[in-house]
Image (cartoon, helix red, strand yellow):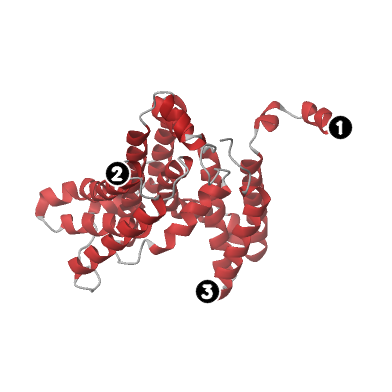
Amino acid sequence: MSDTTIASRMPGFLRRADPAVATAFACIFLLLVFGSLYSTSFLSPEYLLQQLKVASFLGVIATGMMLVILLGQIDLSVPWVVAVGAMMACAAAAHGTAGMILAIPFGVACGVLIGLVNGIGVAYLRIPSMIITLATNAVAQGLMVVYTGGFSPQDSATAGMRWLATGFLLPGVPNAVVVWAIVGAVMVFALTRTTFGRAVYAIGNRERAAYLSGVDTRRIVMIAFAVSGGLSAFGGVLLAGYASKAAQSMGDAYLLPSIAAVVLGGTSILGGRGSYLGTVAGVILITLLQSILSVMQMPEAGRQIIYGVVIIAMLLLYGRAPASR
């Protein structure tokens, strides 16, 4: 029986499914089965909800990263944009009632500002995104070290930040998960139902063709980097609320996972192709992998080796498919 005949007999939703997304969800299922062999509580609703809450922080950050990667660019300023968002939100909280009210918007605005610098550098000055984002990451790090004097930040998160990260607006559903769902829904709408989203995919496929068709490519790229910066900072705000305070190195653990989650979910690193459902699958996959390695009490060196090998293996499976350019 030919492959065409087999495919024609498959249900419609399976024929339409992205192989990369399907593979990611299959790996999630295997990780759940494997994890349950080490701990009977691995499949309990409480544990899975906790893992989903942890995944939501990465999910918010990866949402912005996906937008940039769809353009065929990269944002390496994530570590210190996350830290800037968290530290500036906590710093604002120390300035009375007004500061507590404006803490979250101020932290996000700082991330948007850094993202605008990245976007202007890439879109208008034509600086490679890898270079400009590394530079802004270093500048942000230096500014935060100057601000804290090299010591751990002393400001604490506001009650609103803690509620947003750890509270429960809906019974049994952590607020962080709700926030991620809202951010994801907005991103899906923007990518699939707006001219901005269509422009992002067009630029990722072939920027010159998009420009010749009338798309203001520079403005779209600048906005995408600003959104990425804002979402990274917002992720930092949520992390600060989760931990009750900010830390200088809190964003270091999110650069590789945010890129890996997007790529493992089927978004082409060359731009122009990818779905948000794949990014969701990639985020959950990475979170479960980290959780299993923790349950197995794997030493840190072993965790890094296994983590890297799994990512490389999955990229070799379906991460090299070229985008249609």
Which residue has dot 2 on it?
120
Badge 1: few (under 14), some or many (20 or more) residues near its Cα, within 10 Å? few
Residue 254 visible in the current orientation: yes
Estimate the x, y position of residue 133 in percent, counting from the top left: 35, 54
Indicate left or right for 233 with 313 as reference: left
Q: Camera-side residue: 113 or 282?
A: 113
> How far is the residue under mark 1 from the one under mark 3?
47 Å
Indicate left or right for 61 with 282 as reference: left
Which residue has dot 1 on it?
2
Disc 3 marks which amino acid? Answer: Glu
Instruction: Say which quadrant the N terminus sits in.
Output: top right
What residue is rendered at 65% in x and 51% in y? 27
Q: Is mark 2 on a helix, strand or loop?
A: helix
Instruction: Say which quadrant the C terminus sits in.
Output: top right
Disc 2 marks which amino acid? Answer: Ile
Residue 172 visible in the current orientation: no
Estimate the x, y position of residue 274 in percent, counting from the top left: 54, 38
Q: Are dots 2 and 3 in contact, CB under 8 Å?
A: no
Estimate the x, y position of residue 277 in percent, counting from the top left: 53, 39
Which residue has dot 3 on it?
300
- Outermost residue to the right: 1
What residue is rendered at 39% in x and 29% in y? 196
Badge 2: few (under 14), some or many (20 or more) residues near its Cα, within 10 Å? many
- The label on residue 55 is none
Estimate the x, y position of residue 153 in percent, counting from the top left: 23, 68
> How far is the residue under mark 2 from the one under mark 3?
39 Å
Q: Is mark 1 on a helix, strand or loop?
A: loop
What residue is rendered at 27% in x and 57% in y? 84
Disc 1 marks which amino acid? Answer: Ser
Query: Above or below — where is 37 with respect to 176?
Result: below
What residue is rendered at 43% in x and 58% in y? 254
Dot 1 or dot 3: first in sequence order is: 1
